[in-house]
Image: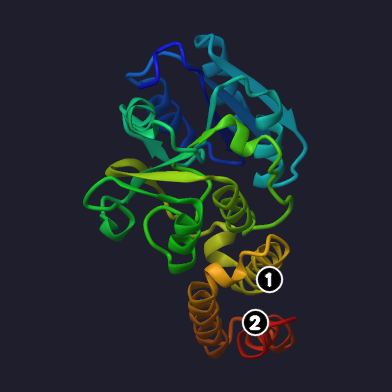
Amino acid sequence: METKKTLISIIVPVYNTEKYIERCLDSIMKQDYPNFEVILVNDGSTDESGIIIQKYKEKYKNISYIKQENKGVGAARNAGIKVAKGDYISFVDSDDLIMEDYCSHLLSIIGDADIAVAGREKYDNVYDKSKTPSQVITVSGMEALKFQMLGKYNTRPAWGKLYKRNIVEDVSFVEDCIFEEVRYSAETFLKAEKVIFANKDLYSYRIRPNSIMTSNEQKRVKELAIALIYVYKILLEDGRYCECKREFEMWLAHTIIQNTQIYCEQVVDTKVFKKYVGELVKLYYKGGI
């Protein structure tokens, strides 16, 4: 059991979320766990986000504010990690919410695990129960990575997790990439010996219709393919691909089918589809790029 002297660093990348950031920050500042710091990284916002951040910084002593040119969410998270002082690190997106016991509950269950994973719900009150196990689960880092490949629980995002500091110290987010979390989660799970999953919804996430993740299908097809190939290569380098070959092939097959459906809906350029989905097909059937 961790004590209340244990410091948690909550890193929040911010880019043009003036409509949502106040509710996000209110949910963070209402934590029933007292010893945490909040690092707000303004990634070149052009709306009123910066003004709102400054207001909260002046009100709360445990908020730090970093300003940078727009470099993407990965770069913003990296900037936050560099200045974080916590024994544990957590990421929250600026349009999402966390429950009042988010920190205290994850801290209470993490024990000797390296990562504690929160259950999650959709912000629009539509529960996504497949992302929250019915009971607390403790698995190896490799088993958690298999969960990620199969899309089980809250494994793919970087947010909604409590990381021991040593797990994130030498793992960086890829910058200027919309699937930086796929790579980051895979690398941190590979580094972890033990991962524990909470059986409670602690994180509430928003799906915004005009975000890059939901509006730019061509970029999604391209960069998800690049991310999967990256994960494949680090597994080979670590000599651990054989441990998760079946799950990785299932992930590949699902991604190929999904991207083919997107292509059939005529929202992806033929050249992009052939190049990036073609590489995934080649990897699936021949086991190499």
**Which of the two residues, 253 or 187, is positioned nearer the viewer here?**
187
Name the amino acid type tagged 2: Leu
Q: Is residue 46 visible?
A: no
**Residue 46: percent from left, percent from top:** 67, 39
Residue at disc 2, secondary structure? helix
Q: Would you name the residue on which mark 1 appears?
A: 229
Location of residue 215 by image quarter: bottom right
Horizontal side of 196 relative to 185 (left or right) equals left
Q: Are marks 1 and 2 in contact (CB under 8 Å)?
A: yes
- The residue carrying pointer 1 sits among few (fewer than 14), some (14 to 19) or many (20 or more) residues within 10 Å by Cα, namely many
**Residue 65: percent from left, percent from top:** 64, 22
Work out how far the residue at label 1 is from the one at label 2, CA to CA, in angstroms. Answer: 8 Å
**Residue 224: percent from left, percent from top:** 62, 69
Q: Residue at x 66, y 69 (%)?
A: 232
**Which of the two residues, 282 or 29, is positioned nearer the viewer here?**
282
Q: Residue at x 66, y 31 (%)?
A: 81
**Which of the two residues, 196 or 159, is positioned nearer the viewer here?**
196
Horizontal side of 36 relative to 47 (left or right) equals left
Residue furthest out toward the left: 134
Q: Earlier in the sequence, mark 1 or mark 2?
A: 1
Horizontal side of 220 relative to 161 (left or right) equals right
Q: Is residue 174 visible?
A: yes
Q: Would you name the residue on which mark 2 appears?
A: 280
- From what the image shows, is residue 269 above or below residue 107? below
Name the amino acid type tagged 1: Ile
- The residue carrying pointer 2 sits among few (fewer than 14), some (14 to 19) or many (20 or more) residues within 10 Å by Cα, namely many
- From what the image shows, is residue 93 above or below residue 100? below
